[in-house]
Image: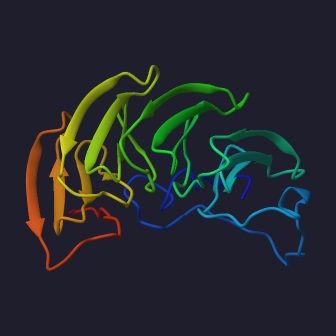
């Protein structure tokens, strides 16, 4: 795990759930970090990158060393709201949404919030990074794109109904699903390329293959 990167939901922004360089030496001995004792269960999957593991428990995002399992920092968003969004680690930022409706970008070294932005409903999907933009969907039915470094809003796309899954990308175009029965593709500027109507509301995300 120390040499691997599962830095967002699905392991990459295509959401393929495949890690070609993953190596876990065995046999594995059971071990429980002191961080987890007497705490609420995790509501989202962990992310690991650059020797660190990022795990949310309740409304707190925790950063732990994979080498010695020590806690490096923690950030509590709101004790009344949990974090369902799996963090995305990109360079020096860990980016995630929360049930308190905000997306936050946190410095991976210090745990300090670099920027945040309030949406109108909870964010349960994992953000993706497309060039210099952070893109995320919200339960308010809007896909937001932010300047990665500053958090300035670049554009919005209104799908009309809730977006609960993670946004995916092939590195240029953006793909996501919505509760309005639709799967969408946008270009990097937030303009719709196409949509496909299914037979019901979609909660699951989109996985992008080589031929899309």
Asked if 38 appears above or below 114 in the picture, the reply is below
Q: Classify residue 173 as left or right of residue 85.
A: left
> Residue 37: image x %, image y %?
88, 64
> Residue 211: image x %, image y %?
21, 63
Q: Classify residue 2 as left or right of residue 107.
A: right
Which residue is depicted at the point 23% across and 30% down?
A: 155
Give whichever of 180, 125 is nearer the camera: 180
Give whichever of 175, 20 is nearer the camera: 175
Q: Quadrant of the C terminus?
A: bottom left
Q: Classify residue 44 as left or right of residue 139.
A: right
Which residue is depicted at the point 88% across and 75% down?
A: 30
Quadrant in the rendering for residue 143:
top left
Protein image colouring: rainbow
Asked if 110 appears above or below 2 in the picture, the reply is above
Asked if 153 appears above or below 205 in the picture, the reply is above
Which residue is depicted at the point 10% across and 59% down?
A: 195
Quadrant in the rendering for residue 50:
top right
Q: Quadrant of the N terminus?
A: bottom right
Give whichever of 132, 134 is nearer the camera: 134
Total numbered labels placed on residues in the image: 0
> Residue 85: image x %, image y %?
51, 54
Q: Classify residue 102 as left or right of residue 198.
A: right
């Amino acid at each position: 795990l120390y040499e691997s990167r599962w830095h967002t939901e699905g392991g990459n922004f295509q959401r393929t759930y495949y890690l070609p360089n993953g190596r876990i030496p065995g046999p594995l001995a059971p071990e429980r970090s002191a961080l987890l004792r007497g705490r609420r269960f995790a509501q989202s999957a962990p992310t690991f990158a650059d020797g660190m593991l990022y795990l949310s428990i309740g409304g707190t995002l925790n950063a732990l060393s994979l080498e010695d399992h020590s806690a490096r920092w923690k950030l509590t968003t709101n004790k009344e709201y949990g974090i369902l969004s799996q963090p995305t680690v990109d360079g020096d930022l860990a980016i995630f949404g929360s049930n308190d409706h905000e997306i936050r970008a946190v410095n991976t070294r210090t745990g300090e919030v670099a920027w945040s932005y309030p949406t109108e409903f909870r964010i349960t999907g994992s953000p993706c990074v497309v060039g210099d933009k952070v893109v995320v969907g919200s339960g308010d039915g809007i896909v937001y794109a932010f300047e990665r470094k500053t958090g300035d809003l670049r554009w919005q796309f209104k799908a009309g109904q809730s977006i609960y899954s993670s946004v995916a990308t092939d590195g240029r175009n953006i793909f996501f699903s919505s509760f309005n029965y639709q799967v969408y593709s946008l270009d990097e500027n937030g303009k719709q390329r196409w949509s496909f109507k299914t037979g019901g509301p979609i909660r699951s995300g989109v996985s992008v293959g080589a031929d899309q």
